[in-house]
Amino acid sequence: MVAVGVLASGRAPAPAGPPLRGRPRPATSLDGTWEFRPGPACSGEPFGTLEVPGLWEAQGHLDLDGVATYRRTVLVPDEPFLTLRFGAVMDAAAVHLDGVLLGRHDLPYTPFELDLSGVAPGPHELVVEVTDHVLRTPEHERSPHGKQGWANQDFPSPPSLYMTYGGIWQPVELRSHGPVVLRDLWADGDPADLTVEAELHNVDAVTRVVRLQVEVPGARREREVRLRCGERRVERFALEGLGLPGWSPRDPVLHDLRASVVVLDAERLLGGAAERPSDTAATRFGVRRVRVAGEHIEVDGVPWRMRSVLVQGFRADTLYAEGDRASIEAEVRAAKDLGFTAVRLHLKAFDPRYLDVCDELGVYVHCDLPVAEPIDHEALDGTGELAEACRAAVVAQVRRDRGHPSIVMWSAMNEIGHDGSDIRPTDAYERFARFLHDAVVSTDHTRPVIENDWTDPDPARVFCSPILTAHWYGRLDEAYLDELEAKATRWSGTGRPLLVTELGDWGLPDMEHRPDPPFWWYGDHYEREVAATPYPAGLAELCRGTQRYLGLADRLQIELLRRHASVGGFCLTELTDVPWELNGLLDLERRPKALAVEELRRANADVLPMLAVDRLDVLAGGEVTGTAWVANDGDALPAGELVLRLGRSWARRPVAPLPAHGPTRLGRIGLAAPEAPGPCTLTVELHVGGDVVGRNEYPVLVVPRPDPGAGASAPGVLVIEEGALDAHRGRTLAEHLADGGRALVLAQQPQAAAHYPVPVTLRPVTTEWGGTDFHFTTDVPALPFLPPRQVLATEDLGLRPTALITGIEGTPWATTTAVGLYKPLPLPNQGTVVGSLDVGPGRLVVCQYSLARAERRGHPLASAARRALVAWAAAGAPAT
């Protein structure tokens, strides 16, 4: 839907051109201060004030759910035909003028209009009764609501922003027009056969004959149209062969589309004002074609490899509404600066100004429609109240936004069935999926549609869409990266594009002390939690370390996906934090997580040389090996050279010309590691024609060569091997410690907890959204080759546990903790990875690192850790 009589909200005025017939009619903004009170219009409570547009939660009414009332006086002009237009009211609105119901609307994100024609000029009382559907009520679960009320079992809101919202949150205006109105104006953007659609509505009580005129650069068309009383009709104009410059991220050219409608008996109707059109409309469009070709999405015939970031649209000040245009532009520029070529606008109809900015800056948009959990699974079907409500929301949003050339595809719904896995295999779910997909396609045939943005490809349950999706959340762990590699390989060759539309890890934002914090502030919580751990460097340093972890975790997963031609792209979750979902690259106030941002800029380079390293730990003087790749998302490149550097070692590899728009495998390569142990950086550069066209780097941990006198065992130290602790060995262990002995118990699974000589709780490690376990070192040098006081990222990549000790004698921490675990919300946890404690006169050392698996895979760090732990146990592992 476009604004009629004025340009769409937030859009710059169209450049000057030949005028259409007549001049536009005026529109009056009704934004500003309204009277407001909680409760229905008849409640009798006194009114206060509230600003429109805006959500009432953002203006202090955090605990208000249900119904509230807005009121103001409207000065109606002396015009025969008037329309009252609301940009959006959340969730439902009942609008009254002078106590008479004008109409209702129950879609929270999209515009609606009410007829005020024939209202006497002068002041009138306008009352809007707004309903915010309460979470977990049938009204909420049977309405399209996006992220309102999502995951409150994990993030109670408030303080989380995943609450339900209410209010007149988009602009309101009163506009005058003649008897025939332009309700919609759209150009489909086809480069060869541009089609313009204009929807006319005769609001008069008699039949009208009008002249409709549309104009784009280089073409003007008009026709006469006869409309019966109350009739709505879409008129189409085919404009072939215009040769308009195309829209692309490199050159986001926008063109003006204008329309006017003139009533042919206007002289008599308007009393001498025939030069005034009955209505005018103006919008912009871009020329480009999007289609699915086999396993690829193409834009203007060129394969498009998606590098996207998910945007949820929450802010610290306006909460679930976008900020002003300057803040929107700053956010989109931040995404571009990080190398993302697209944004996924998640589960709501964003303010149209956001799409305007994406059009102007040349950023692709993957646009979600607001059908999401929690939803009434019992009511899911291809007919009925829920289906019709979701269809109405989908059609309204697509109609409003389909003119934006930045939008490259739609998602009709997201993870429907995730909160009730028994619904997805049913016939009712299939009918619902087909129904919504068809609703999108029938409204916009110019873009592909994802029918249910789902967690795994599952082609048997994707009925209409040409696109498969996956939400593959994991962690910085060699085992998970292997799993991700296997999944990407498994789902190649399906004949459909595969997009990983959600992935990503977590990293805490900077948290300075705030004496007067906002309601959503989480800093005090984390300050208390981190102070209760044995991490010695404090909250600020821990946050910085988690940001480094976040950046490396996201980058290594993105690199893996970019090595697969069968994966058409990815969407990283997410651009900004939502308290307490702290997986953004920026925090809620749009401050960057510096170390994470640095890694993502590297991961998103158009030309990215990569080394799929066999392992990131290496013996001093050994060899770092891996497979070299180049991901090229741009044009073909001529021959060049790959240059690797590690310390003083160099390796070079000639590179043949590189094809465009995909990955190229260059083969195996290796280079010598430094003799000095410690962390170092491996750099990879692609040189073409004397220039560095791509650069990457990897952290490598150089492990000291073993001391010939140090072994995997020591006199007097009992070693319980991984997974070997059973009842018999548990009794042997207890007796050994009772005799004053020293013991090392390597990684065990949860079923072994009963066999420890002290009460122990073991929790399995899970790979899922929000499943990040941060490992940190203390000042205890049990593993001296790991850097002290650091949140570990790739340092222990090949050793990460499959189960964690979360309780020892009633506390998460061993008496002496060398490596600990801290996991924030959701499902927060703390525990010991490596530590020691006294058991009677004996000393017990525990280690949950998966050393055996790592040793089998050739990790020198695993062998070094085993020797160090034996030596630590033999030395007595001092308790302080």
Image (cartoon, helix red, strand yellow):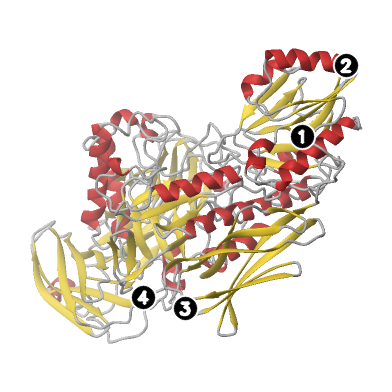
Where is the N terminus found, in terms of image quarters? bottom left
Earlier-in-chain disc, 1 versus 3: 3
Horizontally, residue 829 falls left or right of residue 444, namely right
* Percent of width and height locating residue 139: 36, 33
Looking at the rendered structure, the kind of residue marked 3 is: Leu
Earlier-in-chain disc, 1 versus 4: 4
- Using the image, determine if residue 252 lies above or below residue 298: below
Task: Give the CA distance from mark 3 to mark 4.
Answer: 24 Å
Q: Judging from the image, what secondary structure is the residue with disc 4 in?
A: loop
User: Label 1: which residue?
Assistant: 834
Instruction: Find residue 247 and name its label.
Output: 4
Earlier-in-chain disc, 3 versus 4: 4
User: Label 3: which residue?
Assistant: 637
Task: Give the CA distance from mark 1 to mark 4.
Answer: 56 Å
Looking at the rendered structure, the kind of residue marked 2 is: Gly
Regarding residue 52, the answer to whether it shows in the image is no
Q: Judging from the image, what secondary structure is the residue with disc 3 in?
A: loop
* Percent of width and height locating residue 167: 45, 46
Q: Residue at x 28, y 78 (%)?
A: 23
Q: Judging from the image, what secondary structure is the residue with disc 2 in?
A: loop
Looking at the rendered structure, the kind of residue marked 4 is: Trp
**Label 3 environment density (alpha carbons within 10 Å; few <14, some 14–19, many ≥20):** some
User: Label 2: which residue?
Assistant: 840
Earlier-in-chain disc, 2 versus 1: 1
Earlier-in-chain disc, 4 versus 2: 4
Where is the C terminus found, in terms of image quarters? top right
Q: Residue at x 37, y 63 (%)?
A: 407
Regarding residue 365, the answer to whether it shows in the image is yes
Closer to the camera, 534 or 174? 534
- Using the image, determine if residue 256 lies above or below residue 365: below
